[in-house]
């Protein structure tokens, strides 16, 4: 049994580590409220003594279209990833197709390919197909990162679904698709949330694909919106940080809402004892 002093030490250590991890977030907020003329103060102010909301005004004036585009790309990536990854995961987990082991290895290798290498490959393909500078081209590109991850997550989750559920649905006359849609997907809610969350976050935070494939498009994501504030002779740091603060809010909200689904067991409550 732990002594009270040991518990207090653990609490102190936890608080210190949490403060260290959250300090960059605090500094981002601090800089977003700092006037431009105070950016190069030495030493810098630990709190904004003369706060300004000019950076947030710039977000409202300049960045809302970029935020809307990022939301569109993120939701499109989630939809395409689920449509492709969920049936593939079910097939690998329960239908055992020929070559399934090789496909799993290929998906694992795909996760190791650097994004910049994939971006260069996509550039050549999109140039030939006329898909450059399009938001739906970015959905396809972002999905190539999310789909392999999603297939592996769905395979792992669906492998744990009791075979009795599948057998019972087949006895009741359900075919393969009906079993997948009516039995497997509802039980795999936690896997759906996990894959959706990470797919959205990848698309939301993507810069490499966006800068390579959509640098001149009319609809560009928020990562390129932030980048436009950075120039050779001018860096609008309060606007950059204000945009980063606003852009991080949807991701933070999704993480808070989805954490219990990500942590929960996939078959929790599926079978009664």
Image (spheres, grey):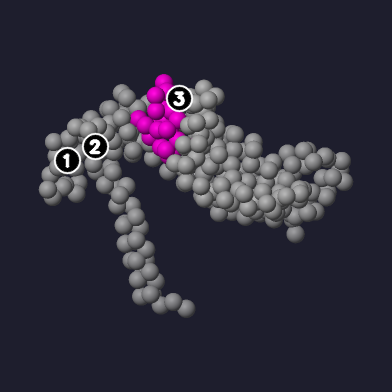
Q: From mark 3 to mark 2, how far is it between C-alphas? A: 27 Å
Residue shown at the point (73%, 39%) measured from the top left: 181
Looking at the image, is mark 3 or mark 2 earlier in the sequence? 3
Please check the rendered image and state whether residue 217 is part of the magenta-colored stretch, yes or no: yes
Verify CB contact (< 8 Å) between mark 2 and mark 1: yes
Task: Please give the residue where the numbered disc 2 appears in the rendered image.
Answer: 237
Verify CB contact (< 8 Å) between mark 3 and mark 2: no
Q: Nearer the viewer, residue 191 or 104?
A: 104
Task: Please give the residue where the numbered disc 1 appears in the rendered image.
Answer: 39
Q: Nearer the viewer, residue 93 or 48?
A: 93
Q: From mark 2 to mark 1, how far is it between C-alphas? A: 8 Å
Looking at the image, is mark 1 or mark 3 earlier in the sequence? 1
Q: Is residue 69 above or below residue 238?
A: above
Residue 32 is at least partly visible in this image? yes
Task: Please give the residue where the numbered disc 3 appears in the rendered image.
Answer: 133
**Dot 2 surroundings within 10 Å: few (below 14), some, or many (20 or more)?**
many
Bounds of the magenta span?
A: 203-225
């Amino acid at each position: 049994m732990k002594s009270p002093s040991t518990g207090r030490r653990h609490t102190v250590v936890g608080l210190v580590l949490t403060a260290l991890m959250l300090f960059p977030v605090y500094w981002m907020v601090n800089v977003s409220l700092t006037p431009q003329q105070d950016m190069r103060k030495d030493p810098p102010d630990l709190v904004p003594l003369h706060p300004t909301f000019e950076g947030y005004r710039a977000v409202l004036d300049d960045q809302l279209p970029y935020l809307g585009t990022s939301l569109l790309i993120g939701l499109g990536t989630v939809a395409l990833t689920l449509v492709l990854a969920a049936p593939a995961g079910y097939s690998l987990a329960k239908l055992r197709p020929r070559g399934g082991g090789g496909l799993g290895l290929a998906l694992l290798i795909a996760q190791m390919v650097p994004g910049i290498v994939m971006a260069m490959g996509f550039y050549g393909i999109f140039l030939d197909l006329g898909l450059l500078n399009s938001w739906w081209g970015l959905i396809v590109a972002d999905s190539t990162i999310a789909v392999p991850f999603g297939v592996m997550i769905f395979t792992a989750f669906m492998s744990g679904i009791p075979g009795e559920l599948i057998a019972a649905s087949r006895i009741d006359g359900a075919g393969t698709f009906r079993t997948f849609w009516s039995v497997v997907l509802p039980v795999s809610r936690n896997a759906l949330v996990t894959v959706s969350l990470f797919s959205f976050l990848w698309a939301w935070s993507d810069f490499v694909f966006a800068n390579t494939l959509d640098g001149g498009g009319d609809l560009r994501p928020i990562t390129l919106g932030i980048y436009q504030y950075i120039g050779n002779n001018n860096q609008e740091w309060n606007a950059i940080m204000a945009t980063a603060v606003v852009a991080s809010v949807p991701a933070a909200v999704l993480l808070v809402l989805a954490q219990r689904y990500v942590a929960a067991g996939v078959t929790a409550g599926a079978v009664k004892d």
